[in-house]
Amino acid sequence: MIAPSASVLAIDRLRVEYPLANGTTFTAVENASLTIQPGEIHALVGESGAGKTTIGNTVMGLLETPGRIAAGSIHIDGKEFDPVKGSAAGIVLGRDVGAIFQDPMTSLNPLFTIGSQLMEAMRFHLKLDRIAAAARALELLESVGIPEPRRRLKAYPHQLSGGQRQRVVIAAALSCNPKLLVADEPTTALDVSVQAQILKLLRDLGDKRGIGILLVTHNMGVVAQIADRVTIMHRGQVVESGATEEVLRRPKAPYARALIGAVPRIDQRLDRFPVLGAEGKGRAEEARAELRTIAERSDPSADVEPILSVENLCVDYTTTGWLPGSRGHRFRAVKEVSFTIRSGEVFGLVGESGCGKTTIANVVSGLIKPTSGRVLYRGQTIAGEGATRRIGPLRQAIQMIFQDPYSSLNSRMRIGLILSEPILYYRLANSRAEAESDVARLIEAVGLESEAGQRFPHAFSGGQRQRLSIARALGARPKLIVCDEPTSSLDVSVQAQILNLLKDLRDATGLTLLLISHDLAVVRQMCDRVAVMRQGQLLEEADAATLFDDPKHPYTKELLSLVPTLDRIRGETQAA
Amino acid sequence: MLKVPLSRLGQAALVMLVVSAVSFVMFRYVGDPVATMSRENASIEEKAELRRSLGLDQPLLVQYGRFLTRTLSGDLGISYRNQRPVTQLIAERLPATLELVIVATILSLAIGIPLGVLCALKPGGIAARLVQAVSLIGISTPTFVTGIVLILVFAVSLGWLPSFGRGQVVDLGWWSTGFLTISGLKSLILPGVTLALYQLTLIMRLVRAEMIDVLSSDYIRFAKARGLPTHYIHFRLALRNALMPVITVTGLQIGSLIAFAIVTETVFQWPGMGLLFIQAVSFVDIPVMAAYLLFVGLLFVLINTVVDILYAVVDPRLRARSA
């Protein structure tokens, strides 16, 4: 074992508990050990509820009450952490330990300038005066690569983009020369290209400044790209720990193997995602049979014409003017986009945030009206000039699945009622009893117990809720389902299950899917054809295999090269 | 940068136009002014003459136009009861109400904000629970009850403070103030406290709720993670975020305090706007009522405009979006 003095962080057999109201305790972290040397990036991975963030918070002394350290020890830069005081003697949070949070949009105070937020820590910890602190703040902004740093000092957080804000957060964390950085999901809220820049910045901090970094993340690609060592956690326990290459290439623990297997691959398409335990084989078969009975199978090959075509679609967003009659600022979110979706295929729409992909989804499902251009469903105009009113079968044919399963189900309605709503609205059942039996079948088809209908949405996990959202969409017996980032708020293993469900759905019923995602690996695994968008324009459209193996547009190439994946592991690329 | 205040002023003018129309309709159609103004046994010819001289035979829009011109030049008509210009009556009564409201607002902010912060920082503490319980009484007791109880205790039983009126006032020509004499200040205490009590509890609860919300936000966690001192985080960073809605509420409350201090003014026989209005109502003094309506409308519009501009000062996100 390495002497605690040499490492910036040494956690030894840590146990964190939360006393519960009923007198028992919940153990969030059990017997966790890890060490970080100066200049080393140590990734702490696991799914939600694994205890990785708890470890990060404990190290920073920000453990939420009533959590407490029940056993084990933490040494920061060789000094022992006092569990009662929540800090180590001689170690000052903010000076010796820096923190980076997940969401750069919310981690800066909107009412204070960037400069003042950067300077305050230096003035308290380093006792710098205003002028010295301002000079150093400028230096810091330069070092994290913010353009026009002098002007940015006086800017407010809302005037900066997400990536720039995260750089400011990193600059603030660095302001007092910490020895250890705790980065909790530092790139999860960012686009791939910005993520790549931030990851490079973090790697440089380790390499050039010798800062030890505890990187808490759920993204295996990120781990592969920048971490030296990795610890995989599951339900508060460390299941595997070691050098990144070793763990990712040759995982020993079954959970580690399953977790790594569940990460969607970008290099090749698999038939189904390997999933963790839960999904029994018999169950899945049964569910698939159920799916088939729900939607009468339509034969995709019989459809010659495209099910959906988008023609020269433009969408403008206008901010209202201040003076009556004055024209506000106009922003064109979608510029002259055209594509067609064939019956029975999975069509992917990818791009970074703000590229207009969700706007297109909203136009297709009728939530917003296009400025010009039109959308046709089986040759009938459903949006744009001369559109038929969406009533009855037309509205029923296109259903939607939203990104956030927590807000897309009404929390005050029972699941049964939520699912029977579309069935009754479109008169797809002759009686309430028939609708109820349909609901029960839908619930079973998405892999849940039919008793689920009696419960309220809060009784379900994120993955289960997304299953229910899918069931709700299926209830209307649609021909086309628009899926807007259906798995981006879910854990990898749950994501794998949901994606498998969507695949089954397509295979069993011949449904057409429009899948909107920023995750290229997911798109690769799911889609037959893919369109790439940037700044409202459609850049490239091709078969999935062609697009991923032989991208034509430089932007597509760039995007693909930036995705952190498991096939590019840090140790290996350096050796090669 | 000027666009926001400009558009607000435009909207304000529009609102005032509507209020003036309502006020005009009331002036013109609530009761017949001719019947109220002429002698009891006046002949039909006399009445018609009066009607002509008052311009009441003109088309409606012409009358409204005249009403607007008169109002804008500061002429709000003559009070039926006092036979004095309404403008003069309001100008006499306004200082009393304003001074009362200023005292009440300062009291409620000065006590309400710290108490709210206290309750948010130590939600389980004895002090916080006590304040919460007392505030519930404050918010649910009608103003006249608090006023009467205060009079009973401090004026009748203890005899420390006067029970009615403004005490001695100093006339500054255009403003009569009670701030400069001992008896004037003493007289302000009871009605001031009475009027402030509801505000105080409202502000306290608002600050508490906002503060609890802000304290759990990411940027406060990030401030903690940077090791900033606790008092700095609470009072310099979090409080500023928590005060945003307090600005709105305080602004609106000042408006309703001025407009509806009626109960307090009646209980304490405070010679302010509220008392003027109550007397006008009991004598069907239409010009005073119409003027009061206009005045209250103007007050709310002004306060809302000021609040909007203040918001832009405090919150950088609401300033010009060109940056």
Image: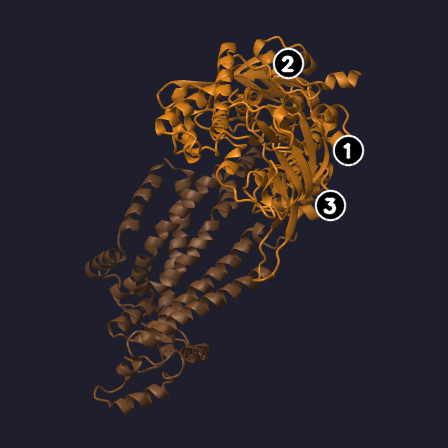
Chain colours: A orange, B brown
Tell me which numbered mark, 2 or 1, is placed earlier along the sequence: 2
- Name the secondary structure under disc 3: loop
Q: What's the residue type where badge 1 is placed?
A: His
In terms of depth relative to the viewer, which is nearer, A114 or A374?
A374
Left/right placement of residue A286 relative to residue A332 reads left
Position in image of residue A516 (x %, y %): 61, 32
Residue corresponding to mark 1: A553
Quadrant containing the C terminus of chain A is top right
Residue B94 in the image: state x and y as whole percent.
37, 71
Name the quadrant containing residue B56: bottom left
**Left or right for A243, reference A25:** right
- Quick check: B132 left or right of A228? left
- For the N terminus of chain A, the image quarter is top right
Q: Do the residues labelled 2 and 1 touch (CB within 8 Å)?
A: no
Chain to which the residue tagged by mark 2 belongs = A
- The residue type indicated by label 3 comes to Glu
Residue on which disc 3 sits = A148
The answer to whether residue A26 is above or below residue A192 is above
Q: Nearer the viewer, residue A125 or B279?
A: B279
Do marks 3 and 1 share a chain? yes
Which residue is label 2 attached to?
A: A3
